[in-house]
């Protein structure tokens, strides 16, 4: 059984940082692309980051580029999302996912994909 479990969400002030973690079982992150996507209330799901390949090639959506960093620990089968300079618009439930590859980006936004596996999410609230 494949399980992805996110952790690290919470309440943070604007300008602050959080680090999200994703623990995988039943699937090896080395064999898949790892995605982070988010969904805010009343908004469409947005894929924001992807890491893939033996060399850990990373891609980020324009909305989080230079603020968020995705990484992966193959030995621990973990993935992470370091989020800096958080703004209220980053408030959302954040999900970790594994997919066959990184989705293409068009004009700085990832195209929609239905991931092969994803977790239940962790809530991030950016507010003063």
Image (cartoon, grey):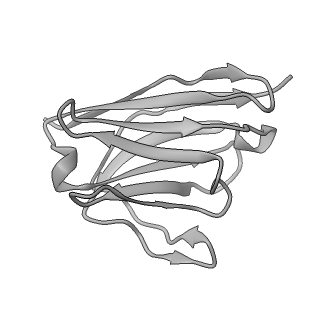
In the picture shown, does residue 118 fall above or below 123? below
Q: Which residue occupies the foreground of this view, 51 or 100?
A: 51
Where is residue 62 shown, x and y percent of the image?
65, 64
Q: Horizontal placement of 53 versus 43: left or right?
A: left
Total tally of numbered discs in the picture? 0
Q: Which residue occupies the foreground of this view, 94 or 57?
A: 57
* Residue shown at 26% from the left, 58% from the top: 55
* Residue shown at 52% from the left, 57% from the top: 47
Where is residue 87 shown, x and y percent of the image?
78, 39
In the picture shown, does residue 24 fall above or below 69? above
* Residue shown at 39% from the left, 43% from the top: 71
Where is residue 92 shown, x and y percent of the image?
64, 38
Q: Looking at the figure, which quarter contains the C terminus?
A: top right
| Quarter occupied by residue 32 | bottom left
Q: Looking at the figure, which quarter contains the N terminus?
A: top left
Name, please, the residue furthest toward the front: 55
Name, please, the residue furthest toward the right: 128
Q: Horizontal placement of 82 versus 17: left or right?
A: left
């Amino acid at each position: 059984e494949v399980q992805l479990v996110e952790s690290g969400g919470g309440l943070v002030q604007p300008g602050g940082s959080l680090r999200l973690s994703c623990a995988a079982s039943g699937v090896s992150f080395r064999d898949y692309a790892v995605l982070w996507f988010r969904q805010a209330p009343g908004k469409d799901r947005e894929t924001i980051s992807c890491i893939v390949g033996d060399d850990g090639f990373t891609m980020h959506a324009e909305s989080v580029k230079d603020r968020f960093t995705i990484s992966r620990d193959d030995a621990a089968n973990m993935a992470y999302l370091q989020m800096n300079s958080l703004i209220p618009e980053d408030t959302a439930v954040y999900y970790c996912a594994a997919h066959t590859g990184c989705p293409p980006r068009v004009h700085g936004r990832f195209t929609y994909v239905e991931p092969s596996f994803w977790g239940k999410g962790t809530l991030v609230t950016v507010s003063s």
